[in-house]
Image (cartoon, rainbow, N blue to C red):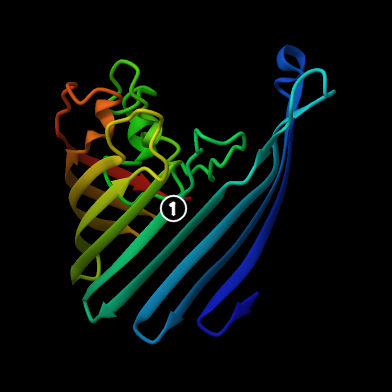
């Protein structure tokens, strides 16, 4: 539905995936409700989305094959940006529920790949593609899938930028991330904190060139189940040419 200054909508999904029926005798049968809002109020722009998952993440053909596993995932996203002439600042928060290891339900929230990219390193699924389908920072048995699906995540981000010319934008942002549910026996739920700075030049309406740098202060989540494990901070320097069509 469109209104003056914005639009809102509701997406409903029905997922019936039978990939595992042959080997494990169950299917995924889930429903998703996802309302969203995009609106401008004077100099303030806001956007938000809520995602509710329900149904069964495992629905067995018969009771003898196994017990159904209910899905109760939840996700949310909100962003606000204040425009002040050529400058702007704002904040955003993203959440995707984690699976509680103490329950028989599947509380995993929605996954987000390239559709939501709040940072250059953490959660940037494009980087995984650029470096040959490899998860950033993966070592041993430590789960590092954050670089692709961004599930089990609570992220806060503040940003600010400036447009020296209509075609040039410079922006800086800082993000802090933690797991919604700490895996069993993990020493910490902290993913870390990241600082990013980018400069983007709009060559044409559909062609832009960006250079950027990011630094991630890695959290102790990646120590896994032993505080004796060592983790190192990460950094990234990149440039890219983007064509939209």
Q: Where is residue 27 in the image (x, y as percent from the top left)?
A: 74, 28
Q: Which residue is drawn at 52% across and 62% down?
A: 49
Which residue shows up at 50% across the image and 33% down it? 101
Q: Which is nearer the eye, 107 or 205?
A: 107
Res. 126 image quadrant? top left
Tell which residue pokes out farthest to the top in this image: 23
Question: What element does badge 1 sit on?
Answer: strand
Would you name the residue on which mark 1 appears? 95
Quadrant for residue 167, please give it.
bottom left
Residue 187 image position (x, y, % from top left): 27, 32
Q: Position of residue 24 (x, y in %)?
A: 72, 16
State which quarter of the image contains the N terminus: bottom right
Q: In this view, does 90 lie above or below 132?
A: below
Question: Left or right of 62: which side holds 48?
Answer: left
> Residue at 49% of width from left, 47% of height from top?
97
Name which quarter of the figure residue 163 lies in: bottom left
């Amino acid at each position: 539905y469109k209104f003056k200054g914005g639009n809102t909508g509701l997406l409903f999904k029905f997922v019936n995936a039978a990939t595992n029926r042959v080997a494990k005798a169950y299917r995924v049968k889930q429903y998703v409700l996802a309302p969203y809002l995009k609106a401008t109020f004077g100099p303030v722009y806001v956007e938000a989305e809520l995602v509710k998952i329900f149904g069964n993440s495992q629905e067995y053909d018969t009771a003898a094959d196994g017990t159904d596993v209910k899905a109760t995932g939840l996700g949310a996203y909100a962003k606000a940006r204040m425009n002040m002439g050529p400058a702007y600042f704002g904040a955003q928060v993203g959440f995707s529920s984690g699976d509680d290891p103490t329950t028989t339900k599947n509380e995993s929230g929605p996954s987000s790949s390239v559709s939501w990219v709040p940072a250059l390193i953490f959660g940037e699924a494009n980087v995984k593609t650029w470096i040959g389908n490899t998860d950033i920072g993966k070592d041993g048995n430590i789960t590092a899938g954050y670089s692709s699906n961004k599930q089990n995540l609570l992220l806060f981000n503040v940003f600010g930028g400036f447009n020296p010319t209509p075609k040039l934008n410079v922006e800086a942002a800082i993000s802090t991330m933690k797991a919604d549910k700490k895996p069993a026996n993990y020493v910490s739920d902290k993913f870390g904190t990241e600082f990013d700075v980018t400069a983007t030049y709009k060559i044409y309406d559909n062609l832009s060139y960006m250079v950027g740098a990011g630094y991630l202060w890695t959290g102790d989540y990646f120590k896994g189940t032993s505080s004796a494990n060592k983790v190192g901070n990460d950094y990234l320097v990149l440039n890219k040419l983007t064509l939209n069509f």
